[in-house]
Amino acid sequence: MAKKTPNSIDRHVGSRLRMRRVLMGMSQEKLGDQLGVTFQQVQKYEKGMNRIGASRLQHASRALEVPVEFFFRDAPQIEPNFSDTAGAVSATSNFVAEFLSSNEGIELNQAFARIKDRKLRRRIVELVRAVAGDDEGEVSSEMRSVRSE
């Protein structure tokens, strides 16, 4: 039997589950206890390998102190016929969700959230955009001029 690949929505919901759990400093075991499942099952939910049911997702939202909608925020879009076909998922959306649920993404977001000055946060975002450049990895002209100084 061929190995089943995770559904894009299940992967997204799982990555949001992991991100929130880690941000709260909660272990997979503790979340599993609160949901009535093993930590291995929590791992499968977080990887999108197993689909989390509606009632269990409701319990997870309470345990993680977020509304249920949190798990679907920025979810990949499915074509109007509601089939999960190749190409229906936004690659950017998946990339961002995967980064945000990575250890590096979580650490970056925790540090960024501690910056109280809104203007400073805005300037940091502008700096990151300048360093990131365009889609082909080209550094912006503003950043090139800074590097040459």
Image (cartoon, rainbow, N blue to C red):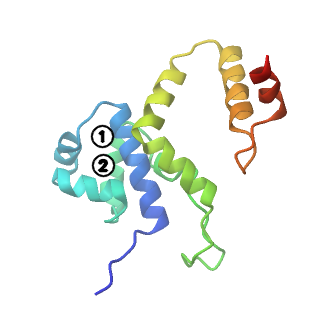
**Res 129 label:** none
Tell me the distance, in whole angstroms, between the alpha carbons under discs 2 and 1. Answer: 6 Å
Instruction: Using a 10 Å C-alpha cutoff, classify the residue at mark 2 as few (fewer than 14 neighbours), some (14 to 19) or many (20 or more).
Output: some
Q: Position of residue 122 (x, y in %)?
A: 70, 22
Mark 1 and mark 2 in contact (Cβ < 8 Å)? yes
Q: Is residue 62 above or below residue 130?
A: below
Kindly give the residue lying farthest to the top in the view shown: 117
Q: Is residue 51 above or below residue 109?
A: below
Rendered residue at 60%/54% (across/down): 93
Rendered residue at 19%/40% (across/down): 30
Please identify the quarter of the rendering in which residue 19 is found. Answer: top left
Q: Quadrant of the N terminus?
A: bottom left
Kindly give the residue lying farthest to the bottom in the view shown: 1
**Res 63 label:** 1
Q: Is residue 91 above or below residue 113?
A: below
Instruction: Using a 10 Å C-alpha cutoff, classify the residue at mark 1 as few (fewer than 14 neighbours), some (14 to 19) or many (20 or more).
Output: some
Secondary structure of residue under mark 1: helix
Q: Position of residue 139 (x, y in %)?
A: 75, 37
Rendered residue at 71%/26% (across/down): 127
Location of mark 2 (residue): 59
